[in-house]
Amino acid sequence: MAAIKRTVNAIGWQRFTYLGHSMGAVVGILYTSVFPEDVKAFISIDIIKPWSLAPELQPAAMKKYFLQYFDNEDKASQPPLIYGEEELVKKTMEGSRSLDDRGARIILQRGARRAEGRVGSLVLTRDLRAKTFFIGFISFEEWKEMAKAITCPLLIIKATDGHKYETEELYKIMLDGFKQDCRHFRYHEMEGKHHIHLTDADAVAGLIVPFFHKLGELGDQDK
């Protein structure tokens, strides 16, 4: 959230539309609730909320996350591994369990680079430290208050076979929180897995484009 705020300040944006998938959408809920004056509209793909750990589980989980972070930090300082292109496409698909071949190749366009002197080989460019997710330490009640704090137009697209972190009952409470003071709220469930924006981009666009049209009607789009 702080990194986004610094970036927004550095490039001089006043207000913007925030579109996020997965962890990006989790950060979007945080950012939009804390800095509502920055966000003119928010689009979340396959996230209603992440998990919330019970208080008694938090010490052990915090230790686990920090140890993972330190381990990834150490790995990031070592020479990167080199993969054959097809091997890395396969590993990306297997790791996600929701990407097809085309989606994996799209991910790798920005997540990998060609290995110097090795034809047909790739090196991952992502920061391994970002693989450790420090979430779960915010209570459900706090997430609900964040949902209620979002007042800009909001679109949530949830994959029917995507990631699930709560019961349907708690998701409903969260959605009611989003609706409470939201100027324009839309919730759609769409068949597919977690990476629906890559595996079925046209269908996702078919929900986002009308949302943008509505923003234009509401006067929330920049000229």
Image (tube, rainbow, N blue to C red):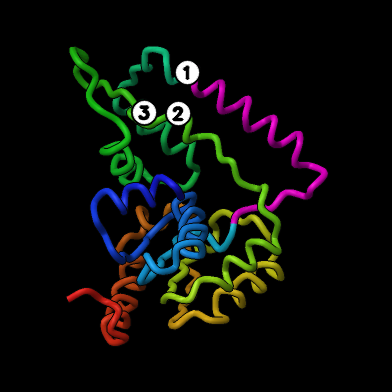
Q: Is residue 125 magenta?
A: no
**Residue placed most toward the observer, 186 or 118:** 186
Q: Label 2 to label 1, Cα distance in Å?
A: 7 Å
Q: Which tag, 1 or 3, sits closer to the chain's start?
A: 1
Point 60% across, 54% down: residue: 50
Q: Tell me which segment is drawn in magenta.
A: 50-74
Picture disc at residue 128? 2
Q: Label 3 to label 2, Cα distance in Å?
A: 16 Å
Residue 220 position, x and y percent, is 30, 79
Q: Which residue is labeled 1 in the image?
A: 75
Element on which disc 1 rests: helix
Q: Are marks 2 and 1 in contact (CB under 8 Å)?
A: yes
Image quadrant where residue 154 sits: bottom left
Please rate how many residues cluster around mark 3, counting C-alpha atoms within 10 Å: few if below 14, some from 14 to 19, many from 20.
many
**Residue placed most toward the observer, 4 or 186:** 4
**Residue placed most toward the observer, 10 or 211:** 10
Point 26% across, 82% down: residue: 216
Q: Which residue is labeled 3 in the image?
A: 88
- Compared with 145, 221 (above or below) is below
In front: mark 1 or mark 3? 1
